[in-house]
Amino acid sequence: MTQHFSYDTPYTSQRLPVFARNIVSTSHPLAAQAGLRMLAQGGNAVDAAVAAAAVMTVVEPCSNGLGSDSFCILWDGKKLHGLNASGRAPAAWTPEYFRRKYGDDRNSPPVRGWDAVTIPGAVSSWVALSEKFGKLPFADLMEPAIEVAERGYAVPVVIQQKWVAASQVADIVKQPGFAEVFLPRGRAPHVGEQHRMPGAAKALRAIGATKGAAFYGGEIAEALARAAAEQGGAATVADFAAYKPEWVEPLGQAYRGHTLHEIPPNGQGIAALITLGILENFDIAGLKVDSAESQHLQIEAMKLAFADVYRYVAERDCMEVTPEQMLDPAYLKSRAALIDPKKAQDFGAGNPVKGGTIYLTAADASGMMVSFIQSNYMGFGSGVVLPEYGVSLQNRGHGFNLQAGSANVVAPGKRPFHTIIPAFLTKDGQPVMSYGVMGANMQPQGHVQTLVRMLDYQQNPQAACDAPRWRYNAGLELNVEAAMPAATVQGLVERGHQLEVINDSYQDFGAGQFIWRLGDPAVEGYVAASDARRDGLAAGW
């Protein structure tokens, strides 16, 4: 007989760091185990990451799916590589297309439905990574996800909470295919209740057998295009067939003798780099780790970064300034001079011209390290699902605007401003840590807060992950976790921050996965952390 436990967590708990020569850290244990399975079969960290990513599309559907986008930074043993697999607009998308359908006063594409969906890139990233760096046959990497999708899995606590919340949102539930796949009992699953996705198993089998071709021009693309035509969308088979991910050179920013690397625009990773470039001008380590003085400087630097990112970042060739100009040391020093240690401010953009996500990471004994992220964008993305293939589609198209002259205006084949960002840390040209923090605009904020704790205060990755976080929203508005020390909260209020203490950590404060290299990976190995704000696991052998 099933015991009906309470799944509340009445006590403060702490996870311990995980040490091993081969590690996979994800926000769901079944995905971590899938990655370890690939390593045990003779695969490498890329094989592990791809297998884990495929499982994540099944077990955390509120955050990602087969219709997601993704980014990756990896160390291949000799150098860093970046991969941008964010979606591109269908050929029919123009400002006029949206205004004809939604009215002349429309400022952006809709949040839900087919007109929020760019051509998804996640599957293409799996194929590209496997072809360039993997050791195992691509079809083998899909097997764990196929098994989980077919047999089902017990829905865990945090994911279930978000599933329930999404099931209350009318514009998600009414989208084609959503209720059939994600509300099969007429409601969201209970904690511990089994959920199966036979359609996703079918899709994963086809993706594995064709190395992704079924998704980009083959049977899945044809089914998606038919659904789009029937349901008012613009995506065509030709749009899917034309999609290709892009290998890119990661951007870097020096901080405390290390270098943080992020994917260049169209993403917001540069926000973390700008923030660290500003913080280089302050003695953070000379302040107490959880003090209002330390947190205030980090918050103000983050505000300055977002002011520039929201003003300038778009597709790289559409930006009026370059990332290099935004990261110019003299410019960042001038921005740092605007910070008042005693007062919160609402900053505007500067002038640099003067000069719903899942994250996972894997590392192996050979030294390969993978920092990988994929996302629906908002919870359950567009809400559109293709039941026959279990494909749930992101809503990244909502990230465009319809304003003529804007760097981020929608156009055929263009990529919108993106929020998901993997991170990678090096020192003297050698790998140190692959990591990421999920959660919309919390991502660069999480990158900065955890890294400052590790580099300025020598906190281990799990402690830095467990520590209470703040989240800047807009203006002077700030959210803080309930575990933030009362004296720190009071000190921030006294500086003029408009604070709200909240308990929902899923999106509000992000969730991270971290792998830090301890030395020779075949001897000393790695230390890993997984965020208790999700259902995850760091597993190694």
Image (spheres, rainbow, N blue to C red):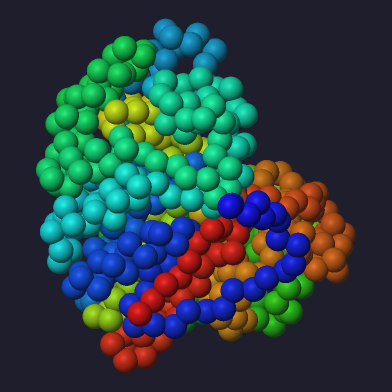
Residue 148 drawn at (x, y percent): 35, 50
Q: In this picture, is 302 found above or below 385? A: below
The foreground one among 307 and 23 is 23
Residue 261 drawn at (x, y percent): 39, 65
Q: Is residue 159 visible?
A: no
Q: Where on the picture, by quarter, is residue 105?
A: top right
User: Along the horizontal axis of the image, is 16 left or right of 144?
Assistant: right
> What's the residue at 85%, 66% (across, down)?
486
Residue 84 drawn at (x, y percent): 30, 49
User: Along the horizontal axis of the image, is 479 left or right of 185?
Assistant: right
Q: In this picture, is 431 found above or below 362? A: below
Q: In this picture, is 208 found above or below 15? A: above
The foreground one among 393 and 6 is 6
The foreground one among 335 and 87 is 87
Residue 513 drawn at (x, y percent): 48, 65
Q: In this picture, is 331 found above or below 286? A: above
The foreground one among 231 and 354 is 231
Residue farthest front in this picture: 1
> What's the residue at 34%, 28% (across, down)?
387
Residue farthest bottom in this picture: 523
User: Along the horizontal axis of the image, is 333 left or right of 202?
Assistant: right
User: Along the horizontal axis of the image, is 489 left or right of 258?
Assistant: right
> What's the residue at 70%, 60% (across, down)?
9
Q: What is the quadrant of the C terminus in the image?
A: bottom left
> What's the residue at 48%, 50% (across, down)?
154
Q: Is residue 219 visible?
A: yes
